[in-house]
Image (cartoon, grey):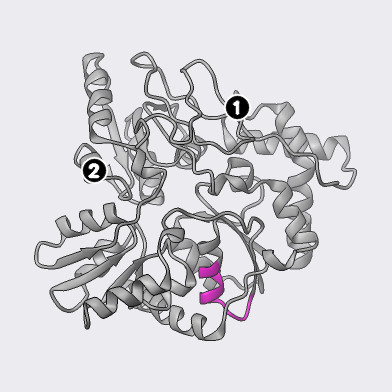
């Protein structure tokens, strides 16, 4: 494994530089001097491969100011960059209104998407419900593919657009429907629980789907004393610890982002902060290994981490370490009314960050066949049962 708090894709930086996102490599920092606030990667520039209407100077200026004010990171998202992005966000929002499109974005998308064009931003559980309940008949899902498939499963009558069909996921891509079939044959009668980071075909073979915000609660409610959990081995280990009265059979997948954090590095940061009188709150995603979670003050989904950081900030907490994908830090910075210090490391998901505004605009104007989610009816039917069971157990 690569240096856990360094760049898993070979693009390590020192503290005084930030990388471009053009090559979609992850970034993290672990060799900054003590007390230095984390630096985030540079904002992506428009590729310049798609034309937009000639909006007036005043329209562009107003939109640029709106973007910069919403994102709240003027050093990374300066006014010049926001002016360059403004024609794209203006045109996307115009087309959304004209076409009746509901645009959903996961929290790990870049801030220009999250705060520039998205109608709904959250973690997987909330977004799956939003896709189901939205009155619009066209959903554009700015995310990775399995999330767009989930939207199609819960709303099969709707058109679901996915601007970046190449955007995969190490968890989803690491398990197949046949793998689940083999597990069921090896353990007959044992319920199979799948994390939402799985393909529609995998969901179709499972009994219930879970997300990072509800997996413990749902598995507590399942009958019997055994269950199979796929595909994330770290979440499975955490689940086994939480469910002392059940045996959890765990698959061997992992998130390529969260697998790069270690408890040793967390301890090093916390000890350094303690030595300098910094009251550091460590917040981690359950896709991290157990030794990371043991060193954490808060464990939860990206939405839970964001909400808890904002709640604690309103009570006076200022120093946080967000052990997860960099998009969570973007949201905390944008949505906090306080000046916060985000210390330590974050890692960027190359899959989530592969979507840019131009991709969304192109998919709205003239979607290619591979940007329209199509699933076999039998897969939708079986996978819908898996997701409906999640909704039932959470009601």
Using the image, tell me which numbered label, if any, was put on residue 307.
none
**Residue 10 in view of the camera:** yes
Tag count: 2
Q: Name the residue under label 1.
A: 76
Is residue 191 shown above or below 197?
Answer: below
Q: Name the residue under label 2.
A: 293
Q: Is the magenta stretch mostly helix, strand or loop?
A: helix
Dots 1 and 2: beta carbons under 8 Å?
A: no
Q: Position of residue 241 (x, y in %)?
A: 15, 55
Please give the name of the residue rendered at 65% of the width and 71% of the height, measured from the top-left corner.
136
Which span is picked out in magenta? 149-158
Choose mark 1 or mark 2, whichever is in front.
2
Q: Is-magenta flag for residue 185?
A: no
- For marks 1 and 2 on the same chain, the one whose residue lies earlier in the sequence: 1
Q: Which residue lies furthest to the left in this view?
A: 245
**Residue 109 in view of the camera:** no
Asked where in the image residue 79 lies, by quadrant, the reply is top right
Would residue 138 be found to the left or right of residue 128 on screen? right
Please give the name of the residue rendered at 30% of the width and 57% of the height, measured from the top-left corner.
252
| Viewer-side residue, 345 vs 80 | 345
Q: Where is residue 357 in the image (x, y as percent from the top left)?
A: 70, 47
Q: Where is residue 176 in the image (x, y as percent from the top left)?
A: 42, 68
SS state under label 2: helix
């Amino acid at each position: 494994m690569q240096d856990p708090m360094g760049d898993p894709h070979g693009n390590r930086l020192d503290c005084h530089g930030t990388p471009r996102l053009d090559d979609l490599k992850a970034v993290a920092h672990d060799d900054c001097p003590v007390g230095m606030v984390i630096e985030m990667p540079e904002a992506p520039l428009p590729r310049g491969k798609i034309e937009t209407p000639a909006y007036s100077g005043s329209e562009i200026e107003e939109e640029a100011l709106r973007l910069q004010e919403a994102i709240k990171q003027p050093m990374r998202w300066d006014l010049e960059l926001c002016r360059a992005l403004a024609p794209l966000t203006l045109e996307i929002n115009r087309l959304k209104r004209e076409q009746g499109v509901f645009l959903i974005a996961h929290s790990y998308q870049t801030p220009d998407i999250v705060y520039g064009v998205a109608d709904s931003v959250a973690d997987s559980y909330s977004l799956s419900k939003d896709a189901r309940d939205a009155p619009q008949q066209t959903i554009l899902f700015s995310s990775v593919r399995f999330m767009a498939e989930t939207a199609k499963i819960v709303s099969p009558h709707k058109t679901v657009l996915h601007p970046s069909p190449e955007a995969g996921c190490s968890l989803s891509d690491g398990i197949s429907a046949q793998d689940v079939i083999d597990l069921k044959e090896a353990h007959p009668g044992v319920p199979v629980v799948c994390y939402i980071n799985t393909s529609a075909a995998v969901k179709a073979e499972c009994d219930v789907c879970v997300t990072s915000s509800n997996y413990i609660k749902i598995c507590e409610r399942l009958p019997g004393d055994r269950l199979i959990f796929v595909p994330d081995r770290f979440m499975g280990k955490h689940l086994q610890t939480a469910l002392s009265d059940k045996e959890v059979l765990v698959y061997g997948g992992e998130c390529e982002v969260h697998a790069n954090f270690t408890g040793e590095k967390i301890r090093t940061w916390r000890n350094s902060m303690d030595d300098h009188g910094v009251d550091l709150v460590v917040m981690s995603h359950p896709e991290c290994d157990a030794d990371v979670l043991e060193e954490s003050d808060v464990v939860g989904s990206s939405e839970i981490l964001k909400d808890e950081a904002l709640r604690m900030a309103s009570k006076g907490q200022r120093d946080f370490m967000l052990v997860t994908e960099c998009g969570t830090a973007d949201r905390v910075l944008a949505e906090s009314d306080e000046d916060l210090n985000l210390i330590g490391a974050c890692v960027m998901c190359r899959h989530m960050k592969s979507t840019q505004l131009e991709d969304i605009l192109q998919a709205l104007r003239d979607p290619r066949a591979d940007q329209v989610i199509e699933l076999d009816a039998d897969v939708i039917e079986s996978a819908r049962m898996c997701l409906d069971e999640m909704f039932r157990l959470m009601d």
